[in-house]
Amino acid sequence: MPPQGRRGSLRAAAMPAPQLQVRTLADGAAELTLSGEWTLGALAPRIGTLVRALNEHPKPASSIWDCRQIATIDSTGAMLLWRAWGRTLPPLLSASAEQLRIFERIAAADRQRAFVSPPSSPFEWLMNIGDGALRMIRQVLDFTDLLGRLLLDSAYLLRHPGEIPRREIFANIYKSGVRAMPVTALVGFLIGIVMSYLSARQLRNFGADVYIVNILGLGIIRELGPVLVAVLVAGRSGSAMTAQLGVMRVTEETDALAAMGVSRSLRLVLPKVVALALTMPLLVLWTTAIALVGGMVSAQLQLDISYGYFFDLLPKVVPVANLWIGLVKGCVFGIVVALVACHFGLRVRPNTESLSANTTSSVVIAITAVILVDAIFAIATRQIGMPF
Amino acid sequence: MKIVSIRDLSTRLGEVLVHRGVNLELERGDVMALVGGSGSGKTALLNQIVGLRAPDQGEIRVFGQPLHGGGRAREAGLRRRFGVLFQHGALFSAFNVFDNIAFPLRELRVLDAGLVHDLVMLKLAMVELLPRHARLMPAELSGGMVKRVALARALALEPELLLLDEPTAGLDPDRSDSFVRLIRMLGEELDLTVLFVSHDLDTVAALATRVAVLAEQRILAVGSMAEVTQYDHPFIRNFFFSERGRRALPTPT
């Protein structure tokens, strides 16, 4: 008798490969003798050939199957045979009681299988459209809900100024404002150089070198500075806010806050919105200044416009209203970015997929919203601050 | 051959020396409980056996081989021979139950989809879940079901050794009992060697054939429940002979 234990002590030392021997008997029936290790580890390297060999016997029911030589069999090996047999025990089978128990277990699992997947409806496309529309409406409602809460919170804080979450606001100002200064400065400086360089080449063709100051001043202060900072902050702080709120949702921290009677919109969302509303104009100012310096350097190198002349001319050709427009835009963009980030952060469901999807949406929607708001600003302020 | 052998293991977590000269051996067929107080380094020891952390000092051999070194294929091959059940299940939250259990099987890259499907359904039935549970996402499962799915995933590659970190933590007594019964049944049926960490005396008493006590940075005692309880040490008195302990022990001494 071959060893019958499921795990012979030899297993690790030498794993005899699973084998299938076929002998055709006098009456034309086939006798299949299985031997070796029919375990996942031993089967994996040669499973393709074994499955093919097993499937070469179209009549498993009329063949003789001898499993007694199998040293070890686990559910993978048993499942392989079970599938070759057409999900039933062949009538001519010799196997040990232990092996039969494994097959019985598989048969029991098979009996449970009543796996009905619901039929797909012919109107699935319509359902998808409706589903999408409903989801969009829900998004808008949720966003409105968040806005309303923040308004109520603000009203409450006006009456109870002692409860203003100062620490959180300051922490957020530091995280999303101070820590953002290097990267916005670098990007601003480079953009200033590029804009100045490209404009200078065109202007020189027309002999209109001096107008570089008008173009840079107006373009950067009124338009590019605020939008640039908003895009950077959406990518940098907005995504961080969404991820933070999202993880707090996953770990039930937001629920813990609510259970302690702390309003999560007041403690988590409001500080972020306030912090960005305060820091964004400052970041805009900072980035705009550095971008102008970059433009100035490039103008001096390319067009020989001295720094002093640039400084002198700038306030004369760019009305100061443009600076105010830029700062107000910065403030509004900051509020938009923070609101969108928090909205998506609070929508995260407790799984990794949802976290990544919401973080992506947060950044994309925030940038899109910023551009939209910018367009509205452009139309609303078209009479203000134009030099001519 | 010893399934797991730990020799002179010392572990330092930051500033704290957690283990100093730990020796432990696990024989084939053992169901060993590793008990110890909170912060005694049970989970740290388990993580090193699993290979998540290389031992600082000393040696750990699983199936007679060290876990680290010798190339990726050797390490992966060795790791496939044991299954791990993490304390909180550690199911992949982006996959549904089916894909979670299928994941290690698909990673082998040799099994066809039909066979993987049948094997997953078999594992699901083995942990007493229904086929319709296969489509649920981990977030939709109760605590007991998470443990069962995680157990099915740990068993997917037909391991010889099963490592469990707090298998019954967070389950109510009823669920905990039935989970222990399931582990014991599967352990016998699949001829598994089991090492589990627990500080629930009921679980230890119901499951373990041998108990190892980890305290004072080393293994204080190893043996059957009766042998270990003979050992006179404040931790053992506290752990096994508290009011709660007396209730769980089968024969009060």
Image: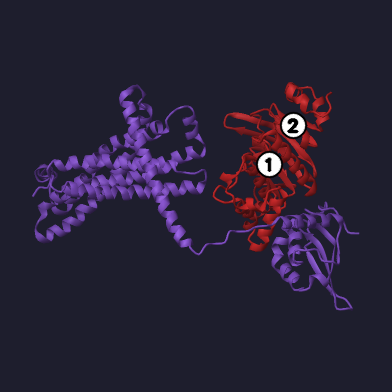
Chain colours: A purple, B red
Judge from the rendering whether residue A319 lies leftward or rightward of residue A364; answer left or right: left
The residue wearing badge 1 is B49
Label 1 resides on the chain identified as B
Decide which of A150, B103 is in the foreground and name it: A150
| Residue A142 lies in quadrant | top left
Query: Tag 1 or tag 2, which sits nearer the N-term?
Result: 1
Indicate the position of residue A112 as horizontal and vertical percent values. 71, 55
**Looking at numbered disc 2 in the image, what kind of residue is underneath it?**
Asp
Residue at figure coordinates x 79%, y 28% from the top left: B249
Q: Mark 1 belongs to which amino acid?
A: Ile
Examine the rendering and report whether any part of residue A240 can be seen. Answer: no
- Chain letter of the residue beneath label 2 in the structure image: B
On the rendered structure, is A144 left or right of A299?
Answer: right
Could you tell me which quadrant the N terminus of chain A lies in? bottom right
Dot 1: what SS?
Answer: helix
Q: Nearer the viewer, residue A382 or B111?
A: A382
Q: Total label count?
A: 2
Circle 1 Cα neighbour tier, 10 Å, few/some/many (<14 / 14–19 / ≥20) = many
* Residue at 72% across, 68% down: A51
Q: Is residue A331 visible?
A: yes
Q: Which of the numbered marks, if any, corresponds to residue B202?
A: 2
